[in-house]
Every structure is written in C-alpha cells, then in structure tokens.
C-alpha cells in the first residue's frame, strides 16, 4: 500500500477533507467551493485505482496507462457535467470543472510516473 502514501494523494485527501468540513459548516470560499473538489477527484480516484491494480495483480511498479486517465476524465466530464445536470436541477454543467478534471489528471499521472 505504498501507493497510498504518495505525497500528492495525501495532500489531495487532506485538502478535499478540509474543503468538505468548510462546506459542512456553511463556509464557502470561491474558487475552492466551486472547483477544488473537481481538481482533486481524479488524483484521489486514480491513485486508489492504481493501488488496487498493484495489489490485485501484485505488480508494485505498474503505472496506469494514459488512456485510462483520459478515459476517467471523459467519464467524469460526461457524468458530472453532462448527464447529472440534465437529471437534477441542483447540479450545473461547467466547462471549468472539466478543465479541473483534466488538470487533476495531468498532475496525478505526472506525479505517479515521477515517483515510480
């Protein structure tokens, strides 16, 4: 489980948790409130997926291929910026969120390749 000790994962987890605590206490700081979760979701999700792949296949040096990462960006974008706003008025589509997903993906993949 060395993968989950990656500094980017730990920092992303702490920042996401802190942002959620602020929101639960009705403290909304722009742009953290609107985009931080979107920036951090893929580093968190992809690191957990990577840890699962490495553990399941017993290949500690495995690196997620770029196509998995960009597929994740596409799926998150379609689901959370395309379908969810159509199904629930509580949610809105935002191109900046898609940019945040992509930026988070670049950071997560770049960091993982640098530390492997």
Image (cartoon, rainbow, N blue to C red):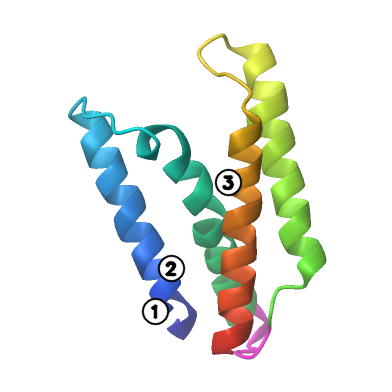
Q: Residue at x 65, y 13 (%)?
A: 87
* Disc 3: which residue: 100
Q: Residues within 10 Å of mark 3 (few under 14, many from 20)?
A: many
Front position in the image: 48 or 37: 37
The reply to whether dot 2 and dot 1 touch (C-beta < 8 Å) is yes
Q: Which residues are magenta?
A: 56-62
* Residue 6 falls left or right of residue 59: left
Q: Residue at x 58, y 78 (%)?
A: 112
Q: Is residue 62 above or below residue 30?
A: below
Q: Is residue 9 above or below residue 71?
A: below
Q: Residue at x 63, y 59 (%)?
A: 105
As for residue 105 lying within the magenta part, the answer is no
Across and down, in percent, residue 30 comes to 35, 32
* Disc 1: which residue: 5
Quadrant where the C terminus is found in the figure: bottom right
Front position in the image: 21 or 102: 102
The reply to whether dot 1 and dot 3 touch (C-beta < 8 Å) is no
């Amino acid at each position: 489980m060395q993968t989950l000790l990656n500094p980017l994962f730990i920092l992303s987890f702490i920042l996401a948790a802190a942002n959620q605590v602020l929101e639960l206490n009705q403290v909304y700081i722009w742009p953290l409130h609107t985009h931080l979760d979107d920036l951090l979701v893929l580093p968190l999700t992809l690191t957990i997926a990577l840890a699962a792949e490495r553990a399941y296949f017993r290949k500690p040096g495995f690196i997620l291929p770029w196509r998995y990462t960009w597929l994740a960006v596409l799926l998150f974008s379609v689901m959370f910026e395309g379908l969810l706003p159509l199904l629930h008025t509580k949610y809105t589509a935002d191109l900046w969120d898609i940019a945040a997903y992509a930026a988070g993906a670049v950071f997560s993949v770049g960091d993982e390749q640098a530390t492997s």
